[in-house]
Amino acid sequence: MKTILGENYYTIDEVAEMIGLSRQSTAAYVREGVIPAVKIGNQWNVKESNIREYLNTPQNVKNEKSN
């Protein structure tokens, strides 16, 4: 995690672990714009608020009844 101007930013690997997806799926979501990210140096980073927004979107919440 990096903190820049009071905002926390996470790498693709960190985000994948947080949201329970593979690194490949998370990177694809970033490429497709499903999860907004910014490139800092040579690494893509996701702002914490964008992770929260992704997790709070109804279609991204796992349906426990389907398991």
Image (cartoon, grey):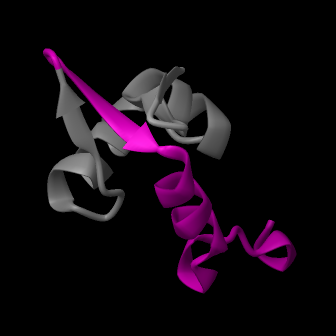
Q: Residue furthest front?
A: 5
Q: Find residue 67 and report its image quarter.
A: bottom right
Relative image position of residue 63 (x, y in whole percent): 75, 75
Does 36 sit above or below residue 57? above
66 inside magenta stretch: yes
- Left or right side of 65 for 8: left
Q: Which residues are magenta?
A: 41-67
58 inside magenta stretch: yes
Does 63 sit above or below residue 17? below
Q: Quadrant of the N terminus?
A: top right
Q: Residue furthest top?
A: 42
- Left or right side of 18 for 31: left
Q: For the point 34% across and 33% down, which residue is it?
A: 45
Relative image position of residue 30 (x, y in whole percent): 26, 49
Does 39 sit above or below residue 38? above
Q: For the point 23% across and 41% down, which residue is it?
A: 38
